Image (cartoon, grey):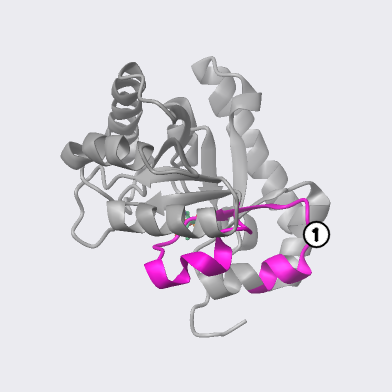
Amino acid sequence: MIKENINYVEQVIDKACMESGRNRRDVTLIAVSKTKPVEMLQEAYETGCRDFGENKVQELVDKYEVMPKDIRWHMIGHLQRNKVKYIIDKVYLIHSVDSLRLAEEISKEAIKKAVDVNILIEVNVAGEESKFGTNMEEAKKLVRDVAKLPNVYIKGLMTIAPFVEKAEENRQFFQQLKKLSVDIAAENIDNVSMEVLSMGMTGDYSVAVSEGATLVRVGTGIFGERNYSVSI
Ligand SMILES: *Cc1c(COP(=O)(O)O)cnc(C)c1O
């Protein structure tokens, strides 16, 4: 089932790329495996997935220990400063940096472990109360401030769009994030790249790809519904 799901998602991405004139190689599918057991991740791995997304530090570390070492782990959930040290040398990309204090902690731990850490700035484009992320107005200043920190490299922006009935309703937010990334790129800030746009989930990744997503984060569409009452 997971194999078929991945093939289907890949086809949708292919189609969205074709229709919007994008190169398929510029879009990477992240399999969001939070709450799912390693057997399911293993199946996705065997299908060819090398990018996995988790939103809890402990779960990411546990899975990191047992899964193959060529996996690129993406931290996509809210990150508490006191937990940065556990994942700093295990993650490929942290998508959820939304404050200078968190970035400073990442920088501090990165220096300690002598690693360079790639991050995205999470932007709450729709301004939803319930969501983390810096707001549109503060995003540029945050990028400029974080850019000065050693061992931390901004690679782009990330957003979690609202939960909507129709994916089209989120197109405006994907367009706004893309525009913001173009604006920031034009500032040519040292140590800052805007090559990555992490946007689009099961309900709306096709729209996100057509608006320029380079990373799409698909969970339910690959692994099925999540059951939060069952612990893994
Ligand atoms: C859970 C999660 C996803 C995947 O959501 P689905 O709707 O299951 O595809 C994507 N991004 C983030 C940040 C998440 O927490």
State the residue at coordinates (21%, 39%).
136
The answer to whether residue 81 is magenta is: yes
- Magenta stretch: give its range: 62-91
Q: Is residue 201 visible?
A: yes
Q: Quadrant of residue 194?
A: top left
From the viewer's perspective, is 210 left or right of 37? left
State the residue at coordinates (22%, 37%).
141
Query: Residue 85, image x and y in percent?
Result: 52, 67
Tell me the element at label 1: loop
What amino acid is at disc 1? Answer: Pro
From the viewer's perspective, is 211 left or right of 113? left
Q: Which residue reaches farthest right?
A: 46
Q: Is residue 189 above or below residue 89?
A: above
Q: Is residue 168 visible?
A: no
- Relative depth, front residue between 83 and 150: 150
Q: Quadrant of residue 33?
A: bottom right
Query: Residue 75, image x and y in percent?
Result: 52, 57
State the residue at coordinates (33%, 54%).
163
From the viewer's perspective, is 146 left or right of 151? left
Q: Is residue 223 above or below residue 195?
A: below
The answer to whether residue 44 is magenta is: no
State the residue at coordinates (52%, 77%).
227
Q: Which residue is mark 1?
A: 68
Query: Residue 101, image x and y in percent?
Result: 30, 57
Q: Quadrant of the N terminus?
A: bottom right
Q: Is the distance from the Cβ of mark 1 to the nearest ligand 1 atom less than 8 Å?
A: no
Q: Quadrant of residue 88?
A: bottom right
